[in-house]
Image (cartoon, coloured by chain):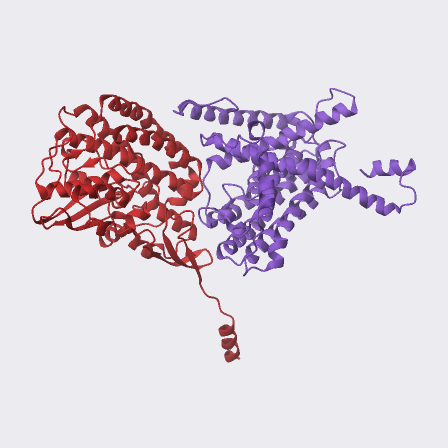
Chain colours: A red, B purple
Amino acid sequence: MSEAVHAESEAFHTEDMTISMGPQHPSTHGVLRFIVKTDGEVMREAIPDVGYLHRSIEKIGEKVTWHGYVPYTDRADYLAAMFTNQGFCMAAEKLGGVEVARRGEFCRVIACELNRIASHLISVGTFGQDIGAVTPFLHALRERETINNLMEEICGARLTYNYIRIGGVGYDITPETCGRITQFLDHFESIVDEYNRLLSYNKIFVERLANVATITKEDAFQYNIVGPNLRACGFKWDIRRDIPYSVYPELEFDIPVGTGEKGTLGDSYDRYIVRIREMEESCKILRQCLQMMPKGPAIAKVARKFKPPVGEVYVRVESSRGDMGFYVVSDGSEYAYRVRIRTGSFTAMSLIDKISRGLMVADLIALIASLDVDAPEIDR
Amino acid sequence: MQQLVDQLLQEGYFQGLPKDAIYAGSMILAAFVVLSFFVAPLAGITSWLERRVWARIQSRVGPNRVGPQGILQWLADGIKNLLKEDIIPAAADKWLFAFAPYVVFVGFLATFVVIPFGSQLIVADLNIGIFYLLAVTSLVVVGILMAGWASNNKWSLLGGMRSAAQIVSYEIPAGLAVLTVIFVAGTMSMQGIIKAQGWAPWDWLLFYNPFTFVAFFLYFTAALAEGNRTPFDIPEAESELVAGYVTEYSGMRFLFFFFAEWGNLYVIGAIATTLFLGGWQVPPVTDNPVLLGILQFVVFFLKAYLWVFVAMWVRGTLPRVRVDQLMSLCWKYMVPLSFICLLGTAAWMVVFPKGNRVASIGMFLIGLVILGLFFKRVNFQIRHARPELYFKPYI
């Protein structure tokens, strides 16, 4: 009898369903791929498969001149191109001992913080869209459009800026543009409140995110989670404050951290709300910069054939996706010997397998959206 | 309809033809006329309007190229989809795959048989009208499940399974909410239910007692879920399941699913209007039967379309719930609440066999207060919306 039952249970068995999610899935933010094993709606594992957007940006760094590499860094993270510009330029300046023009530093911070707002708007907007609310996405893109126009005024490009150069910035920010930025800030600061009313405190939205895919502080340290994702775990760490660069030490701003206000500390909702608050802080920084901007040249004199002395540096900037590091080795020639970019999205991807087990398929989407991973930044 | 054919027969038309054939022919003719001149434009224009309304909510323009203000966009889309290749995946179950859209379509179309557009304007006033309606709309889930299974695609399968679970669950609160109305009206005939109400809002079953008032909102929520509308659009959740059960469909078969979805939106509004909002009842202003018929049709149409608009509004505002949240909302909250409504109405009818006019007017006033608070809130949001509001109805 028992044998018969046993035989039957072997003949009739269930198995997990393997789904290939991506690279052409609508909500994988570019071309990510996950190999998802599910038991119905519940995920058993989700293994990220990266590499669909690899463009050898690091290798190109060894083949083009120091000045010539700056436009390539734009492509490393096209949603926040200013930070990659800045990271590489800072590395080159540190190697070559170039003193950056003070006005140039302020221009950099203004451009970077505008870019941070734009990048967070994309993050917050697509977050809404991944949860099923399409309206916030278009409202966010509407504001981003204004930022794009401002960027176009500042540097002539809307997405890949090539604005920050070794020694300063390519073009000075004119007083008219400063006026327009102030105008935008006046408009935007209350828009954040509108997003909160439309999305952040929406009951369904909170229910979808609170207590979902919690990252503990220990996990965050082990997997090297950085930026807003780390701050959402309640740990106050921001390169702008802790390893200061540029003119950030002179500026006053808060570092928003997750508080677990709607669920547990470090859940998806915290990661969302930290980004919303960072946009407000960026507005504060922008206002201060616009007031403090000194007169003078925007770019220091740098040799056209820039040849930094032999050496290696590692510089870190706080990108909108967290701690972005540039490890650059110079052998004293016109070309860098090695360029290595360390990005926040790549390390965030490694955590997905651990925390996605036991979540629903819909939660995986929320998790990817909340980590704000960006395919070009993962693969480079 | 039948009276008209009888009259024509008595006057000596169609001599020599069997009577049944004439009846059948007339039915097919009527179905054809209703389908091509009412249902298709209705679903099409609803799709256009939804895209326009949605675009405005999202500060876009929306389709405005084909015809005045893009009102013929649906026609262009229909022709485009007709001309597209009808792809059937090699691994699909060909017969089921090809057949599924029609099942969905029939399930949606059959509802138009019992929708009362006016006191005379109804295809068939069945004595089990509302029961028939609940039965045929269940056919939609069969089609969706067929589509999900036959596509041989894992996303489609997940979508189909989600849809089956969702629709079957939400039929229970919807059915119970409908049952409260049947209790009060004492009939299942659609015309009978409307005749149990009056033209004045306090004569509507919505305000009959507090329980029917709650039952209306339960019905509308459950109907949104049954119609796969946001916030319950999990079967085709595009950010999760690519396109759910329609992932593998293309061309006209793809369109059929959406035809049914947009048409269903109107059906939801029409049923809500019939059951709770007095249907085609108009004040006695004229004796002219034609004028009265037109007036009734307009009143019914507008009342039903109001709920179509509300559904569009909801879609533009809310995110999507998760599968388990959807189920817990249904089984933990809506089903018990609808049972309470049912029992409460039954108790109410024992206490007040002829209804309570004071309570009705009181409920009406409460309804007005709720509406007032709602519009106050909307006004607050509009005043605090920083981008310039664009009230111009056309671009």
Could you say where residue B323 lies in the image, as x and y percent from the top left?
A: 47, 49
From the viewer's side, name the closer residue of B148 and A278.
B148
Could you say where residue B235 lies in the image, as x and y percent from the top left?
A: 52, 49
Q: State whether residue A112 is above or below residue B389.
A: below
Could you say where residue A344 lies in the image, as x and y percent from the top left?
A: 25, 47
Answer left or right for A226 relative to B74: left
Residue B281 visible at all: no
Residue A24 visible at all: yes
Report the number of discs: 0
Q: State whether residue B393 is above or below residue A136.
A: above
Residue lying at the far top in this picture: please name it: B285
Q: State whether residue A117 is above or below residue A14.
A: above
- At horizontal 52% and vertical 54% (from top left) the residue drawn is B156
Could you say where residue A376 lies in the image, as x and y percent from the top left?
A: 31, 47
From the viewer's side, name the closer residue of B206 and A24.
A24
Answer left or right for A364 relative to B68: left
Q: Quadrant of the N terminus of chain B?
A: top right
Residue lying at the far front in this picture: please name it: A305
**Toward which corner of the image does residue B222 lie, by quadrant?**
top right
